[in-house]
Amino acid sequence: MSSDSLWLALALVLVIEGMMPFISPQGWRRVFAQLLQMQDGQIRFFGLCSILLGLLLVWLL
């Protein structure tokens, strides 16, 4: 994996992460408010699921 690929992946993450607040700021606020109500364990579980899904996609591609 070249450093160009790593920077491209980071850039795509930033684009995807920025789409929700750009398209629907109200919806993003609701999601963020719900996230603040969650316990640390729940947030860690979703983070772990995201990591595992990302690793699976990297492995498949």
Image (cartoon, rainbow, N blue to C red):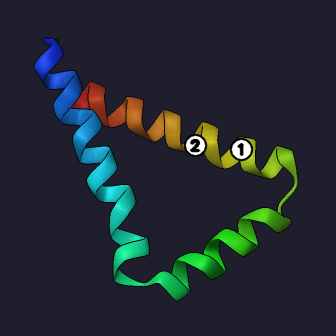
The residue that label 2 is drawn on is 49
Q: Quadrant of the C terminus?
A: top left
Question: Residue 50 at x, y = what percent?
Answer: 52, 43
Above-or-below relation of 60 to 14: above
Task: Mark 2: give few (<14), some (14-19) or many (20+) Cα within 10 Å.
Answer: few
Question: Residue 13 at x, y = what percent?
Answer: 32, 46
The residue that label 1 is drawn on is 45
Instruction: State which quadrant residue 7 falls in.
Output: top left
Q: Quadrant of the N terminus?
A: top left
Q: Amino acid at mark 1?
A: Phe
Question: Residue 60 at x, y = what percent?
Answer: 24, 31
Label 1 near label 2: C-beta < 8 Å? yes
> Label 2 vs label 1: CA separation?
6 Å
Q: Secondary structure at mark 2?
A: helix
For image coordinates 16% across by 33% down, the residue present is 8
Instruction: State which quadrant residue 16 falls in.
Output: bottom left
Task: Mark 1: give few (<14), some (14-19) or many (20+) Cα within 10 Å.
Answer: few
Above-or-below relation of 24 to 40: below
Q: Amino acid at mark 2?
A: Cys
Lateral position of residue 52 relative to residue 9, left or right: right
For image coordinates 44% across by 40% down, the residue present is 53
Above-or-below relation of 54 to 13: above
